Amino acid sequence: MKKQIERAGELRDSLQYHNYRYYVLDDPEIPDAEYDRLFNELKALEEEFPQLVTPDSPTQRVGGRALEHFNEVEHRVPMLSLDNIFNEDGLADFERRLKERLNSAGTISFTAEPKLDGLALSLRYEKGVLAQAATRGDGRVGEDVTVNVRTIRSVPLRLSGNFPEVLEVRGEVIMTRDGFAELNRKAVEEGTKSFANPRNAAAGSLRQLDSKVTATRPLSFYAYGFGEVSGELPQTHFEMMQTLRDYGIPVSPELRLVEGANGCLSVYQDIAEKRDQLNYDIDGVVYKVNSLALQKQLGFVSRAPRWAIAHKFPAQEELTRVEAIEFQVGRTGAVTPVARLQPVEVAGVTVSNATLHNMDEIERKDVRVGDTVVIRRAGDVIPEVVNVVTALRPVDTNPVNLPQHCPVCGADVLRVEGEAVARCSGGLYCEAQRKEAIKHYASRRAMDIEGLGDKLVEQLVDAELIHDVADLYSLEADQVAGLERMGEKSAANLLAAIDASKQTELPRFLFALGIREVGEATARNLALHFGGDLQAIEKAPEDALQEVQDVGPIVASHVVSFFQQSHNIEVIDKLLCAGIEWPSIEKPAAEEQKLSGTSFVLTGTLSKPRDEFKTRLQQLGAKVSGSVSKKTDYLVAGDAAGSKLTKAEALGIRVLNEQQLEELIENAIE
Ligand code: IVH
């Protein structure tokens, strides 16, 4: 028993500490999944030995206490929490328990909607006017954040329609991913503290004592329920949410009405698939019994309603240990620190490396070898280190230093004052940079050499069969066939693909050369401006280059310095001798560019690759960009269009489907 008493005490202390970090400081040290594990361990321990339960145990209350700086607000109807389930079994149990309690075998109707990863807010409207906004606090007493909430644009200050005398709306304050990225970008630029994730940023912003600061933060609000309401209520939760919408209150567009656990599950799968495309973080799907009468009948258990449950997604954050910090050299010589990790499964994938971006980032997060760190893997994004759990740092660690010499070629590593990136000065003498340059040259959007993947490039360079991209064109079949995992057939295929790449287009070729800051769009503009004449580009001075669309002084200087290096000219000459050629480009006459001056954004799944539409639009003079703004003229929305569509609609931008786009292009060509 002594052991259990001790463990319960430990868990309580630890939970209290992490609660404080999370609720009071808005700066959690461990991922939610780890907190849940500690919490569940304590809960299980207390269930087994009820005599261990103390009144101050974290299991006996909902969350943190209200901060002193804001006035306290007592919630007339307590703000509840939700129980969690993690799989289909949990969902089946939930449905079974409901049926038992309701003593009915019939199918239950549920609402299903995303569980937003923000913070709970209660809005009180009196006579249709926003009278008070309060955070959840401990569920019974929260903080009065009215002045701050008034700055959130999606929260109406006045209701519309036939609203009741008193209406308390419950919902979640969130920060969009775009808004969060922009906020952190600015923080880095200004050298101020950045936030770990959108939820912390939303919480920090809402609890700003200076509401002018809050006003600059991109916060949003979605309602998911209600507290005190005067007068008659509709019969169902779904109708109530529709009613709130009618009053002008934002409700998640993903709210669905479904039948039984199966209906819930299909929404779960739907939303899980959409998750990465949403512009805000969600961590699961919430199911609620639709009938308000049944909700009332089911009631509550201590902190959560019996009629609702959160079906959580697998955690995207986990804890692991940093085994080493190594430095990788990229195509442009950028030296990037990478954390080698004790392998850990994050949301179903084993992660053993995480990027640390650059030295500023390492210094800011103070990541050291031996540290226990929080790893996040979201969508297709490269796993990253979110923060260090300083409490678990071993005694004898050292801060990480930037190596003075390139780990690959030994050349000096240089860091330009004021720039975050450090670079190997070895240029194309550095094997790492050469390999990356060749990989880039062969890649799909560049010369598109089928079968020449990263591994094969490494093999070819390691075997000293090639030193630069031009050497590709003098490779011989028997040399290639001799490489590991290659045979005569695959060697012949590779040589055929290399040969086929000789017939190309100048924009591809320019892009493939890997000139700094020259992406596909710039390469296209350059090629077009100089009518397909590579020599003219090679010889163009900076001022002439700056006449090219979207080319400023920085890009121009990179282009000039690229062509000033004799090594680059030699490689280009070798490539041309090998037979690389492209059709001449006639600069389309202005009158042919029917779409010049118009700006498009493409989103969602279209019947053909987006690039194809992009090229066609660009040929007509249109600009195609990646994000929606006030300057966007048209949004082309394919299937499963996500946040860009929502944004375009909000900005009143014209939305086209694929058919309409085809028609528009047709008309422009005629
Ligand atoms: S319903 C009476 N619906 O999750 C039921 N909560 O873990 C109260 N949350 O405090 C909650 N999205 O801050 C509900 N669609 C949603 C939600 C949601 C996010 C948050 C909310 C709550 C916490 C409970």
Image: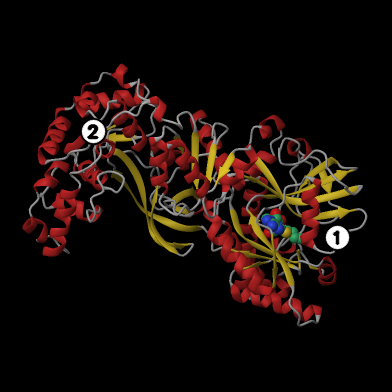
Q: Position of residue 410 (x, y in %)?
A: 19, 39
Q: Position of residue 665 (x, y in %)?
A: 46, 40
User: Is residue 141 in view from this perspective?
Assistant: no
Disc 2 element: loop
Residue at the image point whose x is 87% and y is 54% from the top: 228
Picture quadrant where residue 455 is located: bottom left
Give the total number of marks visible in the rendering.
Answer: 2
Disc 1 element: loop
Q: Position of residue 397 (x, y in %)?
A: 40, 48
Q: Position of residue 194 (x, y in %)?
A: 54, 38
Q: Is residue 359 left or right of residue 121?
A: left
> Can you say whether 47 is above or below 654 in the image?
below
Comparing 92 with 13, the one in front is 92
Comparing 420 with 178, the one in front is 178
| Label 2 sits on residue | 584
Which residue ends up furthest to the front in the rendered image?
A: 670
- The three-letter code of the residue at mark 1 reads Pro
| Label 1 sits on residue | 234
Q: Is ligand 1 closer than 8 angstroms to the Cβ of mark 1?
A: no
Foreground tag (1 vs 2)? 2
**In what quadrant of the picture does the C terminus appear?**
top left
Q: Residues within 10 Å of mark 1 (few under 14, many from 20)?
A: some
Ligand 1 quarter of the rendering: bottom right
**In what quadrant of the picture does the N terminus appear?**
bottom right
User: Between marks 1 and 2, how big is the CA–CA gap?
Assistant: 69 Å
User: Is residue 495 in view from this perspective?
Assistant: yes
- The three-letter code of the residue at mark 2 reads Ser
> Can you say whether 391 is above or below 520 in the image?
below
